[in-house]
Amino acid sequence: MKAVLLTGHGGPEMLRYGDAPDPIAGPGEVVVDIHAASVNAADYKVRLGKGRYSDVRFPHILGRDFSGVVSALGAGVADLAIGDAVFGVTEQGQEGAYAEKIAIKAAIVARKPTRLGHVEAAAMALTSLTALWALEDTARLRAGETILIQGGAGGVAGFAIQLAKYLGASVITTASAHNHDYVRGLGADRVIDYHAEDFATAVHDCDVVFDTVGGDVQIRSYAVLKPGGRLVWIAPAPEGFKPSRKDVETLRPAVARDRAHLERMLALLERGAVWPPAITPFKLADAAEAHRISEGRHLQGKLVFEVR
Ligand SMILES: NC(=O)c1ccc[n+]([C@@H]2O[C@H](COP(=O)([O-])OP(=O)(O)OC[C@H]3O[C@@H](n4cnc5c(N)ncnc54)[C@H](OP(=O)(O)O)[C@@H]3O)[C@@H](O)[C@H]2O)c1
């Protein structure tokens, strides 16, 4: 099969489009012929090889979410059949979606409805899983609460805006000016241009902050929380940072992979509560270009590979 092979740590030039062995379905697994795979911010971090991503054996195939068609069944798989359209997210610590085929545990993929294309399903897999774990399971966001979502135009944050709005929260988000119409269209009630205005003084009394940006943004986010508020993060604060406020909670979602959360996303889609993000398509052979954009940190919505 064709795949994008990461040949070493470094810049996007470390990605080579070439041949890799076909995967085999082990017990409880299916092989999926991938039609679309998405680019996540974690992918360029793995490529750069910093911190917890330093331990990679090359060549390595990146990619955490995909949509495609089941082409082989491992022993014991009874609830999926060859020809089923499915989408999913790889297990934590495993990757391999920048490829024409992937072997994955059947229990963590979900059937893709025909109303959702493969490109859209790939775009919504890890983003929805992460946002659902963060806002529903971890923050336990409730109707009438106010949430500040940092980085609203990004993949996870974009889904989080839709979800928070559906849950009945008042949604504030940060974005560059060229993304304001986009995040308003997703449901944001108030948008802060973080280049022109300091969110830490413009916003106060939030029940929840969802931080998808990290670094200094996370440090300054504590100022906007009311006593008893919750800060949920998926992008880290600077190493060694300890929050000074003792009257708020700091939470990190587990983001376990399972079929139930993907099906929860599909139920929300069916209700019209969420819909696919803005998508920029790429060919697998153009992975280096997609990575330059992802690493630039100012994309809108999702970058998705059309694999076949
Ligand atoms: N399981 C997990 O824990 C998990 C899962 C998924 C992602 N993540 C992490 O979560 C983070 C977000 O991932 P993603 O894939 O959703 O990111 P992404 O789509 O690549 O996010 C890019 C967005 O960040 C915005 N941005 C950059 N700097 C900003 C700032 N200072 N303030 C506000 N917005 C800013 C940009 O918006 P503008 O152009 O408008 O500036 C851009 O739209 C990454 O660090 C990723 O590794 C963790």
Image (cartoon, grey):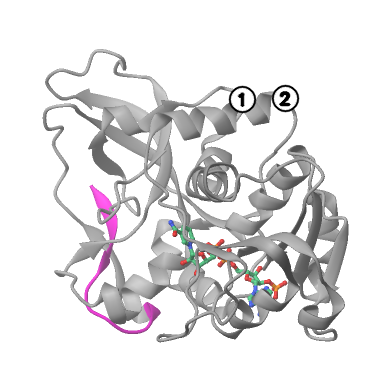
- Taking the image in four quarters, ligand 1 sits in the one at bottom right
Residue located beneath label 1 in the image: 267
| Proximity of marks 1 and 2: CB atoms separated by less than 8 Å | yes
In the rendered image, residue 38, in percent from the top left (x then y), is placed at 47, 53
Confirm whether the magenta stretch covers residue 11. Answer: yes
Inspect this view and state whether residue 176 appears: yes
Confirm whether the magenta stretch covers residue 264. Answer: no
Q: Where on the picture, by quarter, is residue 115?
A: top right
How many neighbours does mark 2 have within 10 angstroms: few (below 14), some (14-19), or many (20 or more)? few
Q: Is residue 45 left or right of residue 54?
A: right
Q: Nearer the viewer, residue 63 or 171?
A: 171
Q: Where on the picture, by quarter, is residue 58?
A: bottom left
Q: Is residue 269 left or right of residue 121?
A: right
In the rendered image, residue 28, in percent from the top left (x then y), is placed at 18, 26
Q: Nearer the viewer, residue 267 or 73?
A: 267
- As helix, strand or loop, the secondary structure at mark 1 comes to helix
Q: Is residue 134 above or below residue 41?
A: above
In the rendered image, residue 10, in percent from the top left (x then y), is placed at 31, 84
Q: CA distance from mark 1 to mark 2?
A: 6 Å
Q: How many marks?
A: 2
Which quarter of the figure is the C terminus placed in?
top left
Q: Where on the picture, by quarter, is residue 57?
A: bottom left
What residue sits 30% from the left and 15% below the top?
81
In the rendered image, residue 71, in percent from the top left (x then y), is placed at 27, 26
How many neighbours does mark 1 have within 10 angstroms: few (below 14), some (14-19), or many (20 or more)? few
Q: Which residues are magenta?
A: 1-12
Q: Nearer the viewer, residue 250 or 238?
A: 250
The residue under label 1 is which amino acid type?
Ala
Residue located beneath label 2 in the image: 271
Q: Is residue 101 left or right of residue 59?
A: right
Q: Is residue 242 above or below residue 27?
A: below
The residue under label 2 is which amino acid type?
Arg
